[in-house]
Each structure stands twice: as C-alpha cells, then as structure tokens.
Amino acid sequence: SLRRRLKLRNFLGCIGLLAIATILYRLFAVAPEKFTMQLTEPDSYQTWISDIIPSTYVPYVRSWANHRPRLDYYYWTDANSLEFVARHYPEILATFRGYPAHLSRADAVRYMLLHKYGGIYADMDMMRLRDLAPLLNNSRELCYLSQERYEITRLYWGYNSSVMNAIMLSAPGHKFMEYVVKALSRFANNSPDVMTSTGPLFLQRVYEEFHYRSPVCDLRDPMCRCVAADPYDFMPQVDPIRIPLFRGKCSSPNQLKPNAVEACRMLDQIGWRNEISEIGTRSYTHHGFLHYGFENQRLKFASVANISSVRADRLSFGREIH
C-alpha cells in the first residue's frame, strides 16, 4: 500500500542511513547556441553516509567503473553533502537541515548536484548494463528522468505513469533542475512525508508543473525541457516482490480501474517475463530493488566493504572538488 511504502522511506530516515548512491558524470559541454552535448572531463560521483557500504552494493558500484570513457571517481559523504549545500545553495540550507527524515536530504542533494555539475545520478542499487555515451552524445536532449514500468505505476500507485529519481541525467545549469531545486523549500512546507516533499511523487508533481502548467522557459529548448525516458531504458524490470500482488489483482479485472486492466494486458502480452536477460537487452541500466529498508533489512550490514577497496582505481573525496 502507499502507506506501507511511505513508512518504508521514513524508516530509512529514522535509522540515519543515506540509502542512495550518486553517480554523476561530468560529461556535458553545452554550447547554448548549438545545444550540443559532448563527452568532456569525465568524472563520477557517489555519496553515502560514510566510507563503509553494505557489501551487497559492491557489484552495482563496480558496474560503473568500467564505463567508457574511463571516469575519475569522487565519493561524497553526508558531511561533504552538507558542505556542498552550504557553499553552493545557501538559500536552501535551512530547508536541507530541517528535513525531519534523513532520506529527504538524500533526495534533495541529488537534484542540486545535477544542477551544479550535470551528469548522471543513480541509486546505489542501479546496475550499469551498457555505456551511456551514445545517449549522452544525443544533441537533441540534455535532460532525462527515469520512469518505472507502466505496469507498476498503474497496478501499485494507480497512476498512468510516474517519473522517478532513481536515475537522472542532466546538463549543468539545466532549467528544469533549477526549477526542481527552487521547489524544494515550497514542498518542504506543504508536504508532510518524504515521498511528496523530495521523493518521486514530489518530482512527478514538479515535472507536471514545469512542462504542462507553467513552463518558465521555451520547451523547444533542450536546456529547458526534460524528457521522461522510456521505462525500458533505465528500469526495465518489474519489482519481483510485487509480482504475486499483481497476479492477484489481475485475476480479478472487474475490480480494477481501466489503466490497471491495461497494465494486466501488458504483462499478459509478454507472458509475465521479468528476467533481465530477456527484457533488458536494450536497457542502459537495471534497478536491483534491494529493499534494504524493509524486506531485506537484516542484509544491510551483514557484510560491509570500504569504498576505498571497492573503487580503488580513481578514488577522491567530494570535498576535494569544492
């Protein structure tokens, strides 16, 4: 249920863990008069509460190490993130400090990092399947948001579609990311929970405001609009633990809304196949759905690893690039 999902995210905040990782590639060189994108100075960024991470995240983190072109790696701790906000977004610092849930700060800083530096943000359990260079070299678009599979949004959330903040791409200084950052204080005052104040439901509302209700710039400009990518580009899999729930719902279509019935039809069309080897052949990334805050909570620190050993290739700490 939505309430259960909200409790999950707030639980993560209460235990004081930044359950995300940021992989930001400074791959964008934007020439405003041409709206071109080039791969330059490729750097990568990740953030976590400390230099100790759950070992089950290791293969996900390492999957980005082999990206071409090769990337320098900058690691951000919670303290580094606070310093970053204080230095570059002082007008938001009070809001940032005041979030009651720790995970809200994890959500908020990803938008600011994207706006400031540009590149790619990805959650800790986001696996790179193939290099994103062809996508980043696309001169027609300079901002992408991921989406969950339509089957999830329609059967679980009840929406037709939903943008996600699990993986996002942006050129530095992009107008949409600027709008998102500016919206943080407004939604912090009006939204009581993580999902609607900084998380995916917040991002969906801001996306709709910006693109459909009150655009602040010319949406024909790639530095203005942001594209909701096809779900299969970044998040091709339906969360495996939701499949039994969805099968149960689809067994009683007369009790479902039309968009949910359509979702069941979509799953039937692919024979409910959900293996990445079958459905992720054209995907750039894959979301692991590790669910450390709920179903697999005991696995979180069953085994740990030091980031220095995981990414020993080109590790620097975020504070060094301030």
Image (cartoon, grey):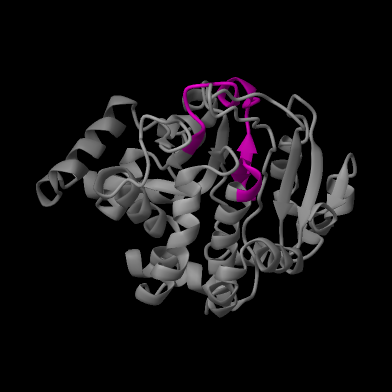
Q: Is residue 131 above or below residue 62?
A: above
Q: Is residue 3 above or below residue 231?
A: below
Q: Quadrant of residue 270?
A: top left
Q: Position of residue 69 (x, y in %)?
A: 76, 25
**Quadrant into which the N terminus falls:** bottom left
Judge whether residue 134 is colored magenta: yes
Residue under the image location 71 percent in, 60 percent down: 48
Q: Position of residue 40 (x, y in %)?
A: 73, 28
**Observer able to see residue 296:** no
Judge whether residue 92 is colored magenta: no
Viewer-side residue, 270 vs 147? 147
Viewer-side residue, 14 vs 190? 190
Q: Residue furthest front?
A: 33
Residue under the image location 84 percent in, 47 percent down: 310
Question: Would you say 157 lies left or right of 144 here?
Answer: left
Q: Is residue 119 above or below residue 140?
A: below
**Observer able to see residue 144:** yes
Question: Would you say 204 lies left or right of 29 here?
Answer: left
Q: Position of residue 163 (x, y in %)?
A: 39, 45
Instruction: Tell me which segment is drawn in magenta.
Output: 116-144
Q: Position of residue 254 (x, y in %)?
A: 9, 47
**Quadrant into which the C terminus falls:** bottom right
Q: Quadrant of residue 150?
A: top left
Residue under the image location 55 percent in, 25 percent down: 277
Question: Would you say 199 lies left or right of 204 here?
Answer: right
